[in-house]
Amino acid sequence: MFLVDSHAHLSFPQFDADREEVIRRACQAGVATIIEVGTDLESSRAAVALAEQYEWIYATVGIHPHDAATLTPAVMAELRTLARHPRVVAIGEIGLDYYRMLSPREVQLRAFEAQLALATELQHRGAPVPVVIHCRQALDEVLAVLRGWKGTGVLHSYSGGPGRLDEVLALGFSVGLSGPVTFPKSERLRAVAAAVPLERLLVETDCPYLTPEPYRGRRNEPAYVRYVVEAVARARELSADAVARASADNALRLFCPPCPSQ
């Protein structure tokens, strides 16, 4: 099976004890590419370092809405420098999170818009570089911002339900599905898996979080992306190989390196 994990956090401390072993297992499981996603300045630096170490790992850089208050002019200047690195393929993880509210709404919104502007500044092939969007209990607000922005990317670990897919797709965005699509009670997510056009589907782990069945409750890792693929395949009544190949092609097309201008 040819797999791409389109959203991972291997640089997080949960992998400090066995990171190389986890990456080896991913390779043995058929994971051909991993998109290592930054969430703050430290993890963005680490994502770039990891991508420098492994030729089949690429990085994104960005400030998560939880850490939006840390996006000072100095941090933005370093993000801009990191984003020009040839191993960086997107800006993210950025967006809005009105569930945990670890940063005030207005601060999250400013950080979100500033990083979309950075993606616009870093043109690739005449368009903004892709963005990786975090959205939790803020879909109306996220879509409103994206309607005023001329670019594309992925709504990672999508939770908006099948009824909002048309709005997401109309903006040119892809839909990322992760471990919860495997959970017994996640019929709504499986409805999304069945409804999203195959050419707009990405699969991801969001490791070390959102571990799929049958490993739910343990630390997640990129090798487990196959379980997401298998759940999506069952929902779509397709072979796992077909879903794996399509989602891999979609991820590689979206994050086609190098994205940022040099």
Image (cartoon, rainbow, N blue to C red):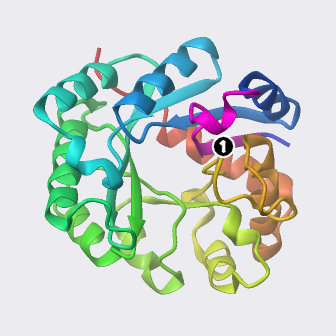
Q: Which residue is drawn at 49% across and 32% down?
A: 256
Q: Can residue 257 be seen in this view?
A: no
Q: x%, y% of residue 29?
A: 86, 37
Q: In which quarter of the image is residue 138?
A: bottom left
Q: Left or right of 178: which side holds 214?
A: right
Quadrant where the C terminus is found in the figure: top left
Give the residue at mark 1: 5
Q: In this view, does 248 lie above or below 203?
A: above
Q: In this view, does 135 lie above or below 261?
A: below
Q: Quadrant of residue 191?
A: bottom right
Q: Is residue 110 above or below residue 234?
A: above
| Residue type marked 1 | Asp
Q: In which quarter of the image is residue 17?
A: top right
Q: x%, y% of residue 98?
A: 33, 72
Q: Which residue is drawn at 28% across and 70% down?
A: 143
Q: Which residue is drawn at 11% across and 32% down?
A: 73
Q: Left or right of 256: which side holds 227?
A: right
> Is residue 160 shown in magenta?
no
Q: x%, y% of residue 92?
A: 38, 43
Q: x%, y% of residue 145?
A: 20, 64
Q: Can residue 105 be seen in this view?
A: yes
Q: Left or right of 126: which side holds 193?
A: right
Q: Which residue is drawn at 84% across and 52% down?
A: 241
- Within 10 Å of disc 1 (Cα), the crowding (few <14, some 14-19, many 20+) is many
For the magenta stretch, what is the residue range?
A: 3-18
Which type of secondary structure does the marked residue at label 1 adopt? Answer: strand
Foreground residue, 4 or 101? 101
Quadrant where the N terminus is found in the figure: top right
Q: In this view, does 9 lie above or below 150?
A: above
